[in-house]
Image (cartoon, rainbow, N blue to C red):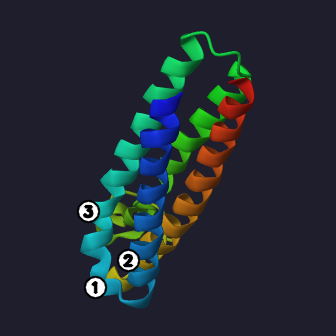
Amino acid sequence: MDAYTGVVYPLVLVACAVLAVVGLLTLALPRLHRVLKLTAPVAYVAAGAQVVAVLLLLFSGIEADMILAIGYLIASVALLALLGIGRLGTPEAAAGDPDPNRPVLSTEQVARVDAAAAVIVAIALAVVSWRILIILENAA
């Protein structure tokens, strides 16, 4: 439990903070979209470390509500699908879809969509991680 509270949980919070700050900066300055693309994998690594750590704790015999904790873990992984969602509006993505009403976004619009999604994911991931921490602390 000490490894989770001392290393993994702070790692997730730092990754969320970095993602939120870069997302907000990208909203203001869309040319920072390249930087946002580089910070998204940090969220994947942090969420992956959290999943491994929590599963190890749950299966090592901690008396936590396993269903609730695993549900929050699934939510934390599902949130990551929103990172980079702006790519669905690129001309290349629209070319592969025969729907003539499909919107095509400009480069700046794609950057802003990705930035807004990154901020939302950062906040939601931090909240989900906090709930997992509460579940684990109540069991310890």
Residue assigned mark 3: 38
Q: Amino acid at mark 2?
A: Ala
Query: In the rendered image, which quarter is residue 115 located in?
Result: bottom left
Q: Give the CA distance from mark 2 to mark 3.
A: 13 Å
Q: Residue at x 44, y 74 (%)?
A: 21
Mark 3 or 1, closer to the camera: 3
Classify residue 38 as left or right of residue 19: left
Classify residue 33 as left or right of residue 3: left
Label 2 crowding class (10 Å Cα cut-off): few <14, some 14-19, many 20+?
A: many
Relative height, residue 79 to residue 102 (above, below)? above
Classify residue 113 as left or right of residue 91: right
Q: Amino acid at mark 3?
A: Leu
Q: Are marks 3 and 1 in contact (CB under 8 Å)?
A: no
Residue assigned mark 1: 31
- Residue 124: image x %, image y %? 61, 56
Q: Residue at x 68, y 33 (%)?
A: 137
- For label 2, the SS is helix
Q: Are marks 1 and 2 in contact (CB under 8 Å)?
A: yes
Query: In the rendered image, which quarter is residue 7 located in?
Result: top left
Q: Residue at x 63, y 27 (%)?
A: 70
Label 1 crowding class (10 Å Cα cut-off): few <14, some 14-19, many 20+?
A: some
Question: Which mark, residue 126?
Answer: none
Residue assigned mark 2: 111
Determine if residue 14 is in view: yes
- For label 1, the SS is helix
Question: Residue reaching furthest bottom?
Answer: 28
Classify residue 69 as left or right of residue 113: right
Q: Amino acid at mark 1?
A: Arg
Looking at the image, which is closer to me, 79 or 57?
57
